[in-house]
Image: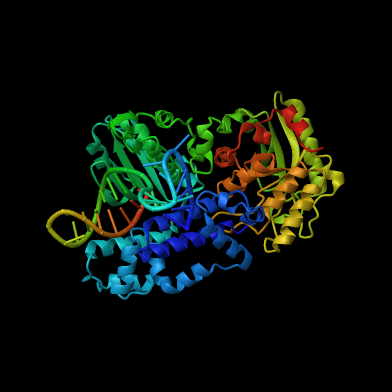
Amino acid sequence: MKNQEIAEIFNKIADILEIKEENIFRIRAYRRASQNIGSLTKDVEDIIKEEKLEDIPGIGKDLAKKIDEYVKTGKMKFYEDLKKEIPKGMLAFMDIPGVGPKTAKVIYEDLKIKNIEDLIVKAKAGKIKKVFGIKDKTIENILRGIDFLKKSEGRTPLYIAMKISNEIINELKKLKEISQIEAAGSLRRRKETVRDIDIVSASTKPKGIMDKFVSLPQVKEILAHGQTKSSIITKEEIQVDLRVVEPECYGAALAYLTGSKEHNVKLREMAVKKHLKINEYGVFKVKADRKIAGKDEEGIYKSLGLSYVPPEIRENRGEIELAIKDSLPKLVELKDMKGDLHLHSEASDGNLSVPEIAELAKAKGYEYIVVTDHSKTLVIAGGLKEKELVLQMEKIDALNKRIKGFRVLKGAEVDILADGTLDYNDGILKELDFVIAAIHAGFKQSREQLTKKIISAMENKYVNMIAHPTGRLMGVRDSYDIDIAKVLKAARDTNTAVEINAYPDRLDLNDINCKLAKETGVMIGIGTDSHSKEHMDNMIFGINVARRGWLEKKDVLNTLKINDFLKKIKK
DNA sequence: GCCGTTTTCGGCCCGACTGTTTTCAGTCG
């Protein structure tokens, strides 16, 4: 799929055009095209075949031609030519927070600095001062930006950001002048990683809140300290912004700061057509200058003739069009989950016994779990030999006779071996209730090999689900190269479920592939891949992905009650 | 560069904070 590559190129073109001080609307057109291509679930190559490129919003004749050229030749002449005009170093400066096209240009041209390393050296030596527009404070900010860029690479995993956010919110909640407060931004939309934490609060007396916020023990640096908006960097090196508005504006501010930017732009465009104006204070009738909504988010959407859009899908991926028709999906919730499909016991590399896991799962309100220890080849994770698996099955049968109102299903996480065969033979697989297959080695094989391996595993009549289908580990390794569209079609045709692995460093499938799975007609299972008691709480992170991928209760296998679940899966 | 219930030309989303150039440009979200 070349979608992401094209999205990135369009974004870079926008950067270059910005430096060249081209028409701002032309630049915006490229950014919008980048965003839209990046969030497509369909492969652009397929769209080209159907001659439907220009049906994509923001793609007209010109950009369609550029996309076509890139897909067919692997290059885009316009971009190649543009790159020659602007030095690489100048573009790199724009990655520094606080540095935009203007500053990047000044650093490169007027200061004659060619790369970030050089910039650090000269700045620290006090050798850049005399230029128009750049003084001590600006230099300080640039250095801080570089520092931030290097240390954090910009993004923090959601679960870490949520912890920090909750701590700060709980601290601020103690202030009596705050009537409402919650996190907004990409954190509220539950993106898998976030760049910063946005918090919104309602109060008629913002000053005390601002002062308290910048003096919290979590604060390492204060970036801004204004009347109603302040920004800090925490000790964990993540930026937190706090905005305070009047209670009558809380819903508007929350919607505004939750985003996404693309979702908001679309809302404002709609508003303009209705002679309305939206900002963080409310929705206004332009002519009468009268406020018609703002206190709560529901009112904001209602004033535009839309049904309420859940934060997780506010990405301008088609949700607004459905909200107009009042036909948004009813997204799956944590309370819909009836079981956990992926758990490891102490028999392989987990640290709980099967009865302990069962007890914890029952306490969570589940009706069933699948115990899925590793198979024999995965020696490093204590994979079970056939004899050991048979022993475990006997124990589970005995356990099920003792416990009431709960069922432990016999399963395994079976390795898909290098040659595409499975680590157990059919004789033993058929004794299991639910079989998960997964790749744990040979990530470097070719796209064709990996795709073929996964599909051949799905064709086995005992394999019920593919675990962590793309194999990524955030911060460790990227997805392996598979043809996900092809894999999903095979999943549909073989009645094999595909997992959302809820482990916070995996979240695999991701949101976009999850939406593609739904559109393909594939059943999704959510598994925590638990190895301990704490891991069993990670189901919520899988739910986050499912919701961002537009999944409803009916799309998720383990929302089914035990009997329906057993009927639904491949026999 | 895109797009059309005013339009195939002339529009295209909105506001806070900082630093610096004492009235505003640059950046960000």
Compared to A190, does A97 lie above or below? below
The answer to whether residue A441 is left or right of residue A5 is: right
Task: Residue lying at the far top in this picture: please name it.
Answer: A404
What is the residue that sits farthest to the right in this orientation? A427
**Along the viewing direction, whichever of A308 and A369 lies nearer the viewer:** A308
Q: Residue at x 51, y 62 (%)?
A: A9
> Quarter-wise, where is residue A205 in the image?
top left
- The part of the image, by quadrant, that contains residue A1 is bottom right
Colour scheme employed for the rendering of this structure? rainbow
Frontmost residue, A498 versus A442: A498
Image quadrant holding the C terminus of chain A, namely: top right
Report whether residue A184 is seen: no
Residue A83 seen from this side: yes
Q: Position of residue B3 (x, y in %)?
A: 48, 47
Q: Residue at x 87, y 45 (%)?
A: A427
Residue drawn at (29%, 70%), measured in percent from left and top?
A123
Q: Position of residue A245 (x, y in %)?
A: 29, 35
Residue B16: name its quadrant.
Answer: top left
Q: Nearer the viewer, residue A344 or A424?
A: A424
Residue A28 lies left or right of residue A384; in this view the side is left
Q: Position of residue A222 (x, y in %)?
A: 28, 51
- Expressed as whole percent of the image width and height from the top left, the position of residue A541 reads 55, 41
